[in-house]
């Protein structure tokens, strides 16, 4: 994703120095017009004064260690932007540490995925206002249009808003998935789900980007035969649920959507086996064995 963002910035006339641990990614960025650094030190040395570094690495340890290195290597007034899906509480903590050294840390919740290069990225920015203004040409180039980026609040708020955005993403995805499964089960109507999702894209109340992508997928592969029903998760859904509990704000749809993800990640659930065992024990009801499947 960082490579695509660099490409979009270069297309808008920005000069980019890029560093990636993977040689392949470095070469790709070079072929798209970025100046390539072979180490983080080289990257910092190549940047002009009031250095601006955009970090786009997986959240957790990779982000933490990259930011720690930058803290040691950058100087007062420099600006670091974390565009990954970091936990907002980590971003608040990092904001304080950077501020102690007179540097600026901005958290940029970034939505757009693999489509962002052409469609633009939606950016939710947290941090110091002057620093945001200083780097605003970057946000303007990455966003689809002037309304596609926003300084939402103080440091941490960008990743908080992105976390909630992803919680909503979970709920929307789960609702579409359930509706499609119900229509598929109604065999007597022989419903064509590719045609129906395409239909809903035009004037329906439930049209959306997620629906656009679903309709396109089903057009090419209506039975989804090769896909497993295992659905991974990167953490933002879980954090949204934890936050809703801490804030005392009910979020039943998002919570159940996250629970469904977790269920999808189990093969044979132990809880299901326990239910089966109890039902058999109290009622003598027949059980289905793994060997029956
Ligand atoms: O807005 C976006 O572009 C997406 O939300 C993006 O950030 C990413 O695809 C998700 O983080 C996946 O999240 P899960 O792995 O939790 O489904």
Image (cartoon, helix red, strand yellow):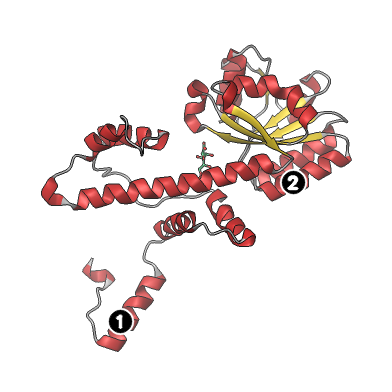
Q: Quadrant of residue 67?
A: top right
Mark 1: few, some, or many residues within 10 Å (few <14, many ≥20)?
A: some
- Cβ of mark 1 under 8 Å from ligand 1: the answer is no
Number of residues whose C-alpha sits closer than 10 Å to that of mark 2, classed few (under 14), some (14–19) or many (20 or more): many
Q: Secondary structure at mark 2?
A: helix
Residue under pointer 2: 92
Quadrant (top left/top right/bottom left/bottom right) for the C terminus: bottom left
Residue 18 percent across, percent down from the top left: 67, 24
Q: Is mark 2 within 8 Å of ligand 1?
A: no
Q: Which mark is residue 279?
A: 1
Q: Quadrant of the N terminus?
A: top right
Measuring 61% from the left and 56% from the top, which residue is drawn there?
A: 243
> Could you tell me if residue 228 is visible in this image?
no
Q: Is residue 112 above or below residue 6?
A: below
Q: Is residue 82 left or right of residue 104?
A: left
Q: Position of residue 239 (x, y in %)?
A: 59, 54
Q: Residue at x 71, y 33 (%)?
A: 81
Q: Residue at x 55, y 57 (%)?
A: 241
| Label 1: which secondary element | helix
Image quadrant in which you'd find residue 2: top right
Which circle's residue, 1 or 2, is located before the other in the chain? 2
Name the residue furthest left: 188
In the picture, measured across the screen, residue 158 lies left or right of residue 179, that is right
Q: Residue at x 88, y 38 (%)?
A: 101
Is residue 244 among what the camera can see?
Answer: yes
> In the image, residue 267 lies at what x, y percent?
38, 61
Instruction: Count every numbered label the image shows and give the total.
Output: 2
Q: CA distance from mark 1 to mark 2?
A: 49 Å
């Amino acid at each position: 994703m960082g490579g695509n963002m660099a490409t979009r910035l270069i297309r808008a006339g920005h000069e980019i120095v890029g560093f990636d641990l993977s040689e392949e990614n470095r070469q790709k960025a070079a072929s798209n017009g970025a100046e390539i650094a072979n180490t983080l030190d080289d990257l910092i040395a190549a940047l002009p004064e009031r250095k601006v570094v955009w970090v786009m690495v997986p959240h957790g340890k990779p982000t933490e260690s990259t930011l720690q290195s930058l803290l040691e290597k950058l100087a007062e007034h420099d600006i670091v932007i974390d565009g990954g899906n970091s936990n907002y509480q980590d971003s608040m903590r990092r904001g304080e540490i950077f501020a102690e050294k007179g540097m600026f840390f901005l958290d940029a919740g970034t939505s757009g995925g693999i489509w962002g290069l052409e469609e633009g990225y939606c950016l939710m920015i947290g941090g110091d206002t002057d620093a945001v203004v200083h780097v605003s040409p970057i946000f303007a180039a990455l966003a689809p249009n002037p309304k596609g980026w926003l300084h939402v609040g103080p440091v941490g708020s960008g990743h908080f808003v992105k976390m909630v955005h992803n919680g909503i993403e979970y709920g929307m995805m789960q609702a579409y998935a359930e509706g499609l499964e119900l229509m598929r089960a109604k065999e007597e109507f022989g419903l064509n789900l590719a045609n129906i999702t395409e239909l809903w894209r035009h004037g329906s109340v439930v049209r959306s980007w997620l629906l656009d992508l679903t309709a396109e997928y089903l057009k090419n592969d209506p039975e989804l035969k090769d896909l497993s029903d295992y659905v991974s998760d990167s953490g933002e859904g879980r954090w949204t649920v934890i936050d809703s509990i801490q804030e005392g704000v009910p979020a039943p749809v998002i919570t159940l959507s996250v629970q469904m993800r977790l269920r999808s990640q189990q093969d044979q659930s132990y809880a299901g086996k326990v239910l089966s065992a109890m039902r058999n024990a109290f009622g003598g009801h027949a059980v289905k064995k793994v060997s029956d499947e």
